[in-house]
Amino acid sequence: MSQQLDFIINRFGIFVIDLFLCIKIKFANNFKVRMLQEKMAEEYAQQEYTGQQFFSDINTRLRDLEERQRILKDRMVLVSESLIREKEKSFNEAQEMKKVVAVLKEDNGRMKEMLKRIAEKIDKTARNEDLMLLQRQFDLFRKE
């Protein structure tokens, strides 16, 4: 019986030692897990902070880009409005010039017609003078 008792004590001792080792290992593993969890929580908090900072930087950059785009859009609107005004102004000036050219053409045509008439009258006048000269010569011959 003492052998059985020794065997049971040994077995129980081994069991207790195994149990103690398991508890120790579990405790150590649990401690490691807790340490890892705490470390991960700190890293996550840092990542979250850097993540927030990252998104804050992205938001800032996005706002800057939107502002630049808005400024460029405003500039484009101003340039296009200025271009439209200049185009209208140039178009109006061209129309006025066309009107002036048309008036000048009419005046030029009238002057040509007037010059033709004057030239015709001069031709007729010269003929009249010739006729008058001939008349004088005739009168002179008659008197003689």
Image: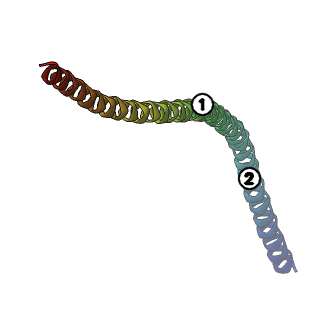
Crowding near pointer 2: few (<14 within 10 Å), some, many (20+)? few
| Alpha carbon distance from label 2 to label 1 | 75 Å
Which quadrant of the structure image shows residue 108? top left
- Write down the residue under mark 1: 85
Task: Name the secondary structure under disc 1.
Answer: helix
Q: Quadrant of the N terminus?
A: bottom right
Left/right of residue 53 with respect to residue 114 in the rendered view: right
The percent coordinates of residue 30 (x first, y second) are 77, 53
Is 77 in front, or is 99? 99
Is 141 in front, or is 67? 141
Tell me which residue sits at (81%, 79%) in the image: 3
The percent coordinates of residue 63 (x first, y second) are 68, 34
Dot 2 amino acid type: Val
The percent coordinates of residue 66 (x first, y second) are 66, 36
- Write down the residue under mark 2: 33
Chosen colour scheme: rainbow
Tell me which residue sits at (33%, 35%) in the image: 116
Tag in front: 2 or 1: 1
Tell me which residue sits at (74%, 48%) in the image: 37
Which quadrant of the structure image shows residue 71? top right
Q: Quadrant of the C terminus?
A: top left
Task: Name the secondary structure under disc 2.
Answer: helix
Which quadrant of the structure image shows residue 10? bottom right
Dot 1 amino acid type: Arg
Is 8 in front, or is 24? 24
